Amino acid sequence: MLRFAVRLILRALGWRMEGEAPQISKYVLIAAPHTSNWDLPLMLAARVEFGVHAAWMGKDTLFRWPFGTLLRALGGIPVDRTSPGNAVVQTSAAILHAERIVVAIPPEGTRKRAEYWKSGFYHIAQSAQVPIVLTYLDYGRKCAGFGPVLDFKLPVNVLMAEAREFYRTVTPKYPDRFGPVRLRQEELIGD
């Protein structure tokens, strides 16, 4: 019933879902681009439509009253951004101990333009030894879907080159807020 209602709402808004979710028991899902408050409700709707029960990370201030209980019920995991290393350790441990889990992470870390993605998604995938799956919300075509499944063993510069190529044609709600698809650590090893 929920899936049918979500499908009607998405169609009324002119959105469509493309492709299918990967049939993998555990992975880190990249939720990008993230430039608008509309990204979260659309991502949650896409999650229902695709049948993916993804947990998602959000800044802890979102989980205060009156919305905290609802956001947790929708799969939200509050993250204290003042200690990012702790979030990597906790999330990796949760993945390792689960039989099935998908963790959605917006690597930009903000709806504002960021010159670098935060690397937590990469470190979580490495530590938990799970693939990284690229997803998208394309406001230009009003569609959402899944992209390639990337092996956690890929060197960071190779993985990010694939991500850059994938997101090159995706239109965010606010294109001026979508910064480069790159990690600061790529500069340390070269492209």
Image: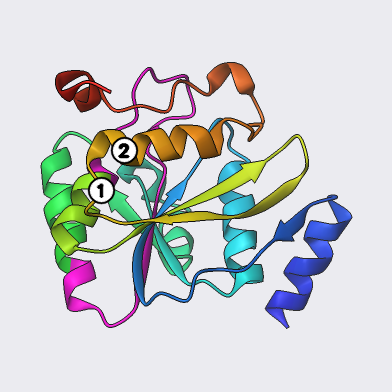
Where residue 188 sits in the image (x, y, percent)? 15, 20
Q: Residue at x 49, y 54 (%)?
A: 148
Q: Badges 2 and 1: C-beta atoms under 8 Å apart?
A: yes
Residue 173, label in figure: none
| Residue sitting at x 37%, y 17% | 115
Q: Looking at numbered disc 1 in the image, what kind of residue is underneath it?
A: Leu
The reply, left or right, for residue 191 in relation to residue 21 is left
- What is the magenta segment's predominant secondary structure? loop
- Tell me what residue is drawn at x 29 percent, y 28 percent: 183
Classify residue 77 by image quadrant.
Answer: bottom left
Is 148 displayed left or right of 86 in the figure? Answer: right
* Residue wearing tag 1: 154
Using a 10 Å C-alpha cutoff, classify the residue at mark 2 as few (fewer than 14 neighbours), some (14 to 19) or many (20 or more).
few
Q: Is residue 123 left or right of residue 143?
A: left
Q: Between 1 and 134, which is closer to the camera in this rendering?
A: 134
Q: Nearer the viewer, residue 112 or 22?
A: 22
Q: Is residue 64 visible?
A: no
| Above or below 75: residue 152 | above
Do we see residue 57 in this rendering?
A: yes
Asked if 173 appears above or below 162 in the picture, the reply is above
* Callout 1 secondary element: loop
Q: Nearer the viewer, residue 82 or 133?
A: 133
Position in image of residue 37 (x %, y %): 58, 37
**Hey, what amino acid is under mark 2?**
Val
Q: Which residue is mark 2?
A: 158
Please state the extent of the stretch shown in magenta in the rendering. Answer: 94-121
